[in-house]
Image (cartoon, grey):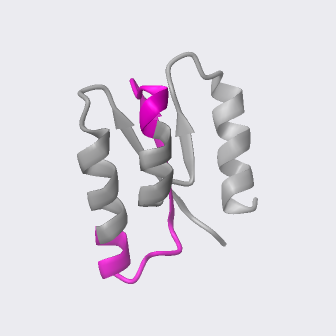
Amino acid sequence: MSMSSGVSSLAAGHKTLVPQVIEELKKQGASDIKVVVGGIIPPGDYEFLTNAGASGIFGPGTVVTDCANQTLNIIGA
């Protein structure tokens, strides 16, 4: 079964925290865990986060059921 880890950022730390979380997962042998990100994230940062390894990004106003459905799709559930 696939797993997902979420990172929520309300303090503009997403460009630092998300790559660190993804790198630490790799170091721990857990690169199969998908990371999804939510919070106050400018659309201009989405490409950076995707390139860093984020599997899903949910910005302000994203409908909760859309987040849930997309996360389920990401983990293959």
Residue 32 drawn above or below residue 4:
below
Q: Quadrant of the N terminus?
A: bottom right
The spot of residue 9 in percent (x, y) is 33, 33
The quarter holding residue 24 reads bottom left
Classify residue 51 as left or right of residue 27. Answer: right
The spot of residue 20 in percent (x, y) is 26, 59
Residue 43 drawn above or below residue 33:
above
The spot of residue 47 in percent (x, y) is 49, 45
Classify residue 19 as left or right of residue 59. Answer: left
Q: Quadrant of the C terminus?
A: bottom right
Residue 51 drawn above or below residue 6:
below
List the single residue furthest toward the top.
Answer: 61
The quarter holding residue 63 reads top right
Residue at x 46%, y 75% (from the top left corner): 31
The quarter holding residue 10 reads top left
Residue at x 53%, y 40% (from the top left corner): 57
* Magenta stretch: includes residue 43: yes
Classify residue 58 as left or right of residue 20. Answer: right
* Magenta stretch: includes residue 74: no
- Count how many numbered circles sit on residues in the image: 0
For the magenta stretch, what is the residue range?
24-45
Residue 14 drawn above or below residue 42:
below
Residue at x 37%, y 76% (from the top left corner): 26
Residue at x 51%, y 26% (from the top left corner): 59
* Residue placed most toward the observer, 5 or 27: 27
List the single residue furthest toward the bottom.
Answer: 29
The spot of residue 17 in percent (x, y) is 26, 49
* Residue placed most toward the observer, 77 or 11: 11
